[in-house]
């Protein structure tokens, strides 16, 4: 049998891993690096990605969003909008071999796909929807853009999208902002780390209208203004005048308004204090205060967003140090569906939240979790002959929902098994060895348990469904109550017969193997009081050997030393048996009644003293 203590293997450092990858790459004929601007996700990377995506999903679901998805390949026409958008020059597009050929692209963003899917639910004649509005949908698609790579920007990235379709009130924007804040809080990012910069295309539209800019110039002017942080005010002024015929005085009016630090200042500079758009934006900030996120949001006149389809509130999220690109951005796009043929305008608002920049921020703030490989059990066979039994044990443990790794080689040397379990990140190791297997048990060692008395447990193969309970997890295992009372657990022919102990806590009472007049205590957790039963009232035979699972091995004969000790014990004068107080059924009924009474008091909110008094009666 295996009894040695586990050894601890040190994990390879990141430096050593990188060195190993470089050495491996130098001896391989092909280029092992992914295409420029793209990423490989090794298991360590995938664990962090899954963690991040789970946080995205949790925040979305807590706000009532439903998940959707679509093909990464989209029709090119979805993205050919007239407004001088950069996105049309950044697509990975190509022509298919269909007849006639189709022009398709790897999706650069998800919003047009959402619009296409919503339109598929609409009746073309009158715009009636097959689904009840509003729709609250989210997705985490991979998007592709051919652009210059830099910190926080790749040519492929995953993007968490949340959209609300069918709500024309500012409450929809507030709900989206609250969802993003919920995510930040779940990963340890606070309002001291990031801020939401919020503006409105409607407010900017009021400024342009007052300055005399034609309506048809609005979208392209917004695209140019969005470049303000990148190219500076002089270049923006030049493009407005040269490319779109905007007068110098109008260009300066726009740029002066962009310098405002508050909404009130912006409204005063642009002469739009009484506009509906300004009042709507003030309402948004008031609702954010009510939501408890007033310290997260601020007005920023320079935020315009470069996509032409935005029509109302727009926002972006930046780190307060100003070291990274926008973490998240979005806004209202009420007219996008009409661009694609909708017979009527349907209000929409949403955001996109990329995975690249947030990962940079989480690394910088030291908020990324340390996620190693996690395996619940490694199952090791002592020899090749024990491998069939090893497979049975692995299957039985996996059926409980535990993660099980089967050691591929035999483990006659205990250190070899511990070494493998340590590399797997296993919590426990199950040894399948002849002595234990012939006795119907599997020896389990807990590699993380410091208490030596709890580190090793022999679990009956027939009770693998309750393996966790032997380590204090979930339902208690047969025999555990008896062991707790100082009575050895039965095995083989003396396995426990199921006897109800408490209505809310059914455990079998296990007699001592001799089955002769030994009291067995089982503690009911409802009132933490031992109930005593004479084993003779149960009978000394216990469960018959035939009740064992067919796949479990028959118990071996007792060793000679144990047989001799047993014979010596039988020669001693026997004490008078304690008479049972009543049949098992009567005791069970009493316990059931007590348990039901206690649960009733607990549900009624009774104090502990009242419960104890009721039990004492």
Image (cartoon, rainbow, N blue to C red):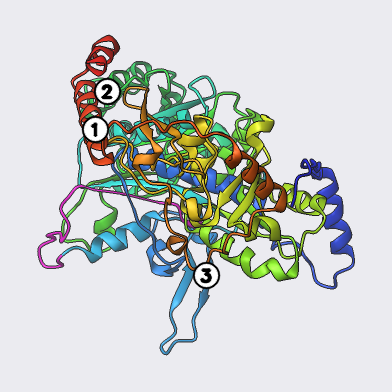
Mark 1: secondary structure: helix
Q: Would you identify the image quadrant in which residue 230 lies? A: top right
Q: Main secondary structure of the magenta part?
A: loop
Question: Residue 552: x and y, percent?
Answer: 54, 63
Question: Residue 395: x and y, percent?
Answer: 54, 63
Disc on res. 93: 3
Residue 613 inside the magenta-drawn segment: no
- Dot 3 surroundings within 10 Å: few (below 14), some, or many (20 or more)? some
Residue 464 makes an appearance in the image: yes
Mark 3: secondary structure: strand
Q: Is residue 394 left or right of residue 278?
A: right
Name the one closer to the observer, 137 or 558: 558
Q: Identify whether 344 is placed above or below 162.
A: below
Q: Is residue 544 left or right of residue 398?
A: left
Residue that lies at the very extreme toward the left in this rendered image: 126
The reply to whether callout 2 and callout 1 are in contact (CB within 8 Å) is yes
Q: Would you identify the image quadrant in which residue 391 lies? A: bottom right
Question: Residue 255: x and y, percent?
Answer: 46, 29
Name the one closer to the observer, 569 or 136: 569
Q: Is residue 60 left or right of residue 460?
A: left
Residue 39 makes an appearance in the image: no
Give the residues in magenta: 123-143
Query: Badge 2 is on which residue?
Result: 287
């Amino acid at each position: 049998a295996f009894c040695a203590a586990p050894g601890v293997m040190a994990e390879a450092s990141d430096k050593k891993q990188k060195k190993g990858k470089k050495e491996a790459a130098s001896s391989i004929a092909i280029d092992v690096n992914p295409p420029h601007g793209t990423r490989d996700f090794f298991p360590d990377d995938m664990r962090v990605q899954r963690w991040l995506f789970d946080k995205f999903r949790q925040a979305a679901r807590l706000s009532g969003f439903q998940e959707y998805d679509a093909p990464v390949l989209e029709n090119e026409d979805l993205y050919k909008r007239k407004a001088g958008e950069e996105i049309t020059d950044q697509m990975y597009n190509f022509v298919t071999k269909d007849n006639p050929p189709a022009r398709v692209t790897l999706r650069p963003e998800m919003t047009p796909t959402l619009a296409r899917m919503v339109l598929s639910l609409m009746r073309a004649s009158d715009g009636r929807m097959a689904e009840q509005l509003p729709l609250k949908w989210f997705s985490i698609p991979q998007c592709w853009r051919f652009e210059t790579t830099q910190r926080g920007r790749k040519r492929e990235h995953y993007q968490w999208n949340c959209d609300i379709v069918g709500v024309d009130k500012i409450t929809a924007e507030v709900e989206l902002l609250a969802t993003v804040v919920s995510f930040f809080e779940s990963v340890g990012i606070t309002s001291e780390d990031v801020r939401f910069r919020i503006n409105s295309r409607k407010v900017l539209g009021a400024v342009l209208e007052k300055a005399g800019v034609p309506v048809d110039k609005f979208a392209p002017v917004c695209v140019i203004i969005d470049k303000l942080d990148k190219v500076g005010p002089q270049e923006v002024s030049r493009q407005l005048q040269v490319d779109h015929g905007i007068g110098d005085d109008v260009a300066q009016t726009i740029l002066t308004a962009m310098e405002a630090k508050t909404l009130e200042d912006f409204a005063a500079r642009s002469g739009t204090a009484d506009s509906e758009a300004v009042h709507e934006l003030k309402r948004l900030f008031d609702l954010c205060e009510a939501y408890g996120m007033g310290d997260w949001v601020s007005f920023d006149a320079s935020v315009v967003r470069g996509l032409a389809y935005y029509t109302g509130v727009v926002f972006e999220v930046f780190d307060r140090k100003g070291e990274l690109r926008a973490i998240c951005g979005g806004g209202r796009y009420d007219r996008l569906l009409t661009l694609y043929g909708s017979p009527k305008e349907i209000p929409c608002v949403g955001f996109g939240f990329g995975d690249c920049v947030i990962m940079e921020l989480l690394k910088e703030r030291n908020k990324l979790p340390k996620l190693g490989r996690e395996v619940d059990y490694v199952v090791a066979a002592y020899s090749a002959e024990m491998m069939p039994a090893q497979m049975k044990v692995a299957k039985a443990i996996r059926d409980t929902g535990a993660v099980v790794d089967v050691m591929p080689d035999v483990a006659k040397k205990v250190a070899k098994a511990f070494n493998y379990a340590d590399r797997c990140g296993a919590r426990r190791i199950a040894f399948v060895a002849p002595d234990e297997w012939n006795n119907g048990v599997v020896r389990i060692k807990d590699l993380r348990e410091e208490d030596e008395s709890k580190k090793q447990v022999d679990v009956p193969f027939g009770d693998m469904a309750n393996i966790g309970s032997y380590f204090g997890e979930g339902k208690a295992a047969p025999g555990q109550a008896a062991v707790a009372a100082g009575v050895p657990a039965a095995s083989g022919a003396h396995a426990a017969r199921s006897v109800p102990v408490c209505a809310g806590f059914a455990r079998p009472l296990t007699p001592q193997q001799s089955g002769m007049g030994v009291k067995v205590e089982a503690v009911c957790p409802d009132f933490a009081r031992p109930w005593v039963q004479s084993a003779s009232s149960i009978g000394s035979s216990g469960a018959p050997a035939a009740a064992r699972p067919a796949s479990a091995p028959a118990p071996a004969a007792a060793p000679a030393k144990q047989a001799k000790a047993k014979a010596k014990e039988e020669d001693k004068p026997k004490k008078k048996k304690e008479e049972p107080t009543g049949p098992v059924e009567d005791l069970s009924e009493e316990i059931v009644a007590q348990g039901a009474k206690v649960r009733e008091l607990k549900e009624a909110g009774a104090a502990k003293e009242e419960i104890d008094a009721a039990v004492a009666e």
